[in-house]
């Protein structure tokens, strides 16, 4: 008789019960609602004998694996006979198959599962260990259910033999239900095999059983019809399970390539459209360079991180965000800061040479102090396990204070520069910057800029230098206009060429939904209509539940006509605005920008929608990679998501270093993440806490605590080393930071999986008697 602890299964069963309670009950017979867990073997047998839909609907509502397997066993057996043990009333009625010589019984005693083999039809109490405690005042729940011989594998452990049996049972259920249930065939109800997969794997829903059924591609593909409300344009799990037949290697390669593509295109959108219009908006609002750099341009530089966090933390309308999405996002937040402050800082310092980098004491002290404070707040909130509305407000207020100090430092720098009529800049000790310099936003034709320069464009302002205007590109010929809108840079390097090639398939859509800072007689006339066609697609936050799907996929929409009317109104407004733009431009001088601020604000919206759509795909693809590789969401965020988010930071900061702007690069390393951590994440957590009744979970693993705690030590060591070295950051410091990153990462993961090992074998057999 094999014994296995039930507590992991109880946790899964409770989660499944919550899931079931959130759905409309489907288990009915003769017009009466039934409790699937309370049905006897005789009832299951009769429901199956009648080939009724109710058998499958009731099986779908079951929440325990032994109930489901017993029901399936008796669905193909003779009419069961009942046996009652007077000496053990707590065991209840035992139903047995009279045609079976050997009975395989699933004996549940409280939180323990046991396998019992019975010969004949006359069980005795002594074969049920501890049966006497089943009817005591302690209230230990016991049950005895007969299952198939092959089902024994799922009693002892959920090893490969159990998975084979579950996969076979899933196929059996799918074929049987399709033959009698027209609603399942039409996709209106979920198949009973979906519940079987969820219950067997202790998951909340069937699709989460994808990794558990690894190696059984047909069963994995069946899961794709379960919980099919996917919120990404591409169904990555379906591609893996069905298109690639469960091939983990090629699915991982495909997802990594798609992630690379998404990060590249997000950079193209932010570099080519978002940042240039943000500069124009800042100028229109009469913002100073320092304020512009600390607010709008900081948003443009962290657009990827911010929108990934927004789409992850506020998924499903903001009220029911997925815990795995939130863990992925938070992991990205933790990992990005550690990566930039250690590894990227090391690259810049090593690039500077043996003489090191002379820094401004007040600027470096300010930036590292606030960075230390931001990391400390995350550690504090992680120890609490939640963030309240007031705690999120504190994060925003600290960033406001940081902006205030930056503005004051900028005014001091301008006064010092004004006092020095000729000569080096008082802030950096280097020649005074000029508009259009190599580190500014205008390194390419038109409004398109070099790869990663968007994350660097706000750094000069934070260092007390002016923000460069995006250059105007006189696109006189058709070839020049084509280059402008295709994003071609004459002086671009290999990365710019790669970005150009990868973004080319999407360029027509980008050109017709986002404006550049250069007027084009044809494109700008078409833009209002293109924007009004695109906004209904992206404004809902989910590409699969936008106004177009609500309007034209009637079976999935509660009010298709309302969505259709809204769409028509958008289209008519777009057409009217395009006609107004055309008629106005005919009466103005050539190249005169019509309503430029209106185009800038509209492009600000559409560019954020583009980044949000791509960020949503990043989360979907990254979750599949984590499923295939067996990685939890937070480690995925700390590594893959953080590295992807930092691609443009690496290029931007190294571009500054190559241009000799080392001090501006150092400012970017410590000031750059400030907006994302304090204001961006603070705003997301603030909104999430409001939507969740005043507080929102803030989950941190031991690895995250180790990383952030180590970063605090590294920040203090960096500041002390710079002060001791005469406010100079040296190559030795760069070597230390470069070594620190992999060391801290390894220690964090070692502690994480040492203290909290994977629960992959949580259902393994631990005792036999």
Image (cartoon, helix red, strand yellow):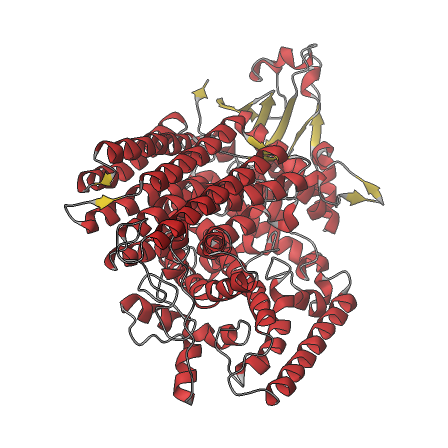
Residue 317 location, x and y as percent?
A: 65, 50
Q: Is residue 540 above or below residue 670?
A: below
| Residue for point 57% across, 44% down | 683
As rendered, which of 542 and 442 lies closer to the eye? 442
Give the image quarter of residue 540.
bottom right
Q: Position of residue 49 (x, y in %)?
A: 72, 47
Q: Is residue 763 left or right of residue 744?
A: right
Tell which of 730 and 135 is nearer to you: 730
Picture coordinates of residue 485, whole percent (x, y): 44, 78
Which quadrant holds residue 38? top right
Q: Residue 195 vs residue 712: left or right?
A: right
455 in relation to 533, above or below: above
Q: Nearer the viewer, residue 686 or 79?
A: 686
Residue at 62% across, 44% down: 687
- Residue 103 appears in the picture as rendered: no
Give the residue displayed 72% in from the left and 64% down from the top.
555
Nearer-the-camera pick, 94 or 123: 94
Please give left or right for residue 578 compared with residue 116 in the image: right
Name which residue lies at 49% across and 45% down: 403
Query: Is 482 drawn above or below residue 707 in the view shown?
Result: below
Residue 244 visible (yes or no): yes
């Amino acid at each position: 008789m094999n014994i296995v602890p039930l507590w992991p299964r109880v946790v899964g069963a409770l989660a499944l019960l919550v899931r079931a309670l959130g759905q409309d009950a489907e288990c009915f017979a003769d017009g009466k609602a039934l409790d699937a867990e309370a049905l006897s073997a005789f009832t299951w047998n009769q429901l199956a004998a009648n080939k009724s839909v109710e058998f499958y609907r009731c099986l779908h509502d079951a929440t325990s694996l032994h109930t489901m397997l017993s029901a399936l066993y008796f669905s193909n057996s003779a009419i069961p006979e009942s046996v009652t043990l007077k000496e053990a009333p707590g065991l209840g009625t035992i139903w047995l198959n009279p045609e079976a010589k050997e009975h395989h019984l699933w004996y549940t005693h409280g939180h323990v599962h046991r396998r019992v083999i019975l010969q004949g039809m006359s069980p005795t109490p002594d074969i049920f260990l501890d049966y006497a405690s089943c009817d005591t005042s302690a209230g230990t729940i016991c049950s005895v259910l007969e299952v198939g011989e092959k089902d024994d594998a799922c009693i002892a452990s959920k090893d490969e033999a159990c998975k084979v049996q579950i996969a076979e049972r899933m196929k059996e259920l799918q074929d049987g239900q399709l033959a009698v249930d027209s609603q399942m065939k039409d996709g209106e109800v979920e198949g009973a095999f979906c519940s079987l997969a969820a219950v067997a794997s202790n998951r909340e829903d069937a699709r989460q059983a994808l990794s558990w059924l690894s190696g059984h591609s047909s069963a994995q593909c069946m899961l794709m019809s379960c919980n099919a409300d996917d919120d990404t344009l591409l169904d990555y799990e379906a591609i893996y399970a069905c298109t690639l037949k469960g091939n983990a290697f090629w699915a991982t390669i495909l997802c990594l390539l798609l992630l690379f593509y998404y990060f590249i295109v997000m950079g193209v959108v932010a570099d080519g459209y978002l940042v240039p219009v943000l500069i124009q908006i800042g100028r229109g609002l009469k913002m100073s360079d320092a304020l512009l750099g600390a607010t709008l341009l900081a948003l443009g530089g962290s657009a990827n991180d911010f929108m990934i966090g927004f789409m992850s933390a506020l998924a499903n309308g903001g009220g029911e965000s997925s815990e795995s999405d939130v863990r992925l996002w938070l992991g990205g937040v933790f990992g990005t800061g550690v990566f930039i402050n250690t590894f990227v800082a090391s690259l810049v310092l090593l690039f500077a040479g043996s003489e090191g980098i002379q820094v401004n004491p007040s600027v470096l002290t300010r930036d590292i102090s606030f960075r230390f404070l931001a990391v400390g707040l995350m550690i504090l909130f992680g120890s609490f396990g939640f963030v309240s509305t007031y705690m999120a407000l504190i994060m925003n207020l600290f960033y406001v204070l940081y902006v205030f100090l930056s503005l004051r430092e900028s005014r001091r720098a301008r006064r010092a520069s004004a006092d020095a009529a000729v000569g080096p800049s008082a802030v950096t000790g280097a020649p005074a910057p000029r508009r259009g310099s190599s580190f500014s936003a205008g390194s390419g034709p038109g409004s398109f800029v070099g790869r990663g320069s968007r994350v660097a464009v706000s750094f000069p302002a934070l260092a007390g230098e002016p923000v460069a205007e995006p250059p105007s590109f006189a696109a006189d010929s058709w070839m020049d206009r084509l280059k402008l809108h295709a994003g071609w840079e004459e002086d671009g390097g290999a990365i710019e060429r790669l970005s150009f090639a990868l973004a080319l398939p999407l360029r027509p859509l980008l050109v017709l939904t986002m404006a550049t800072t250069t007027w084009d007689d044809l494109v700008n006339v078409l833009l209002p209509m293109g924007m009004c066609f695109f906004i209904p697609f992206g404004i809902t936050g989910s590409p699969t539940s936008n106004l177009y799907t609500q309007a034209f996929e009637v079976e999935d929409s509660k009010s298709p006509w309302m969505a259709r009317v809204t769409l028509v109104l958008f289209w008519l407004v777009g057409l009217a605005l395009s006609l107004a733009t055309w008629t106005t431009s005919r009466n103005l001088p050539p190249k005169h920008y019509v309503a430029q601020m209106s185009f800038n604000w509209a492009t600000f919206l559409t560019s954020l929608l583009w980044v949000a759509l791509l960020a949503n795909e990043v989360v979907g693809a990254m979750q599949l990679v984590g499923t295939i590789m067996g990685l939890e969401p937070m480690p995925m965020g700390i590594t893959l998501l953080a590295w992807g988010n930092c691609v443009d930071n690496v290029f931007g900061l190294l571009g500054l270093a190559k241009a000799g702007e080392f001090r501006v690069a150092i400012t970017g390393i410590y000031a750059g993440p400030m907006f994302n951590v304090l204001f961006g994440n603070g705003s997301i957590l603030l909104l999430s806490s409001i939507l969740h009744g005043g507080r929102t979970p803030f989950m941190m693993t031991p690895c995250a605590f180790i990383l952030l705690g180590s970063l605090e030590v590294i920040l203090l060591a960096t500041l002390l080393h710079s002060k001791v070295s005469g406010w100079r950051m040296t190559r030795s410091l760069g070597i230390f930071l470069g070594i620190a990153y992999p060391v801290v990462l390894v220690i964090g993961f070692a502690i994480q999986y040492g203290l909290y090992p994977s629960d992959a074998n949580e259902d393994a057999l631990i005792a036999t008697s």
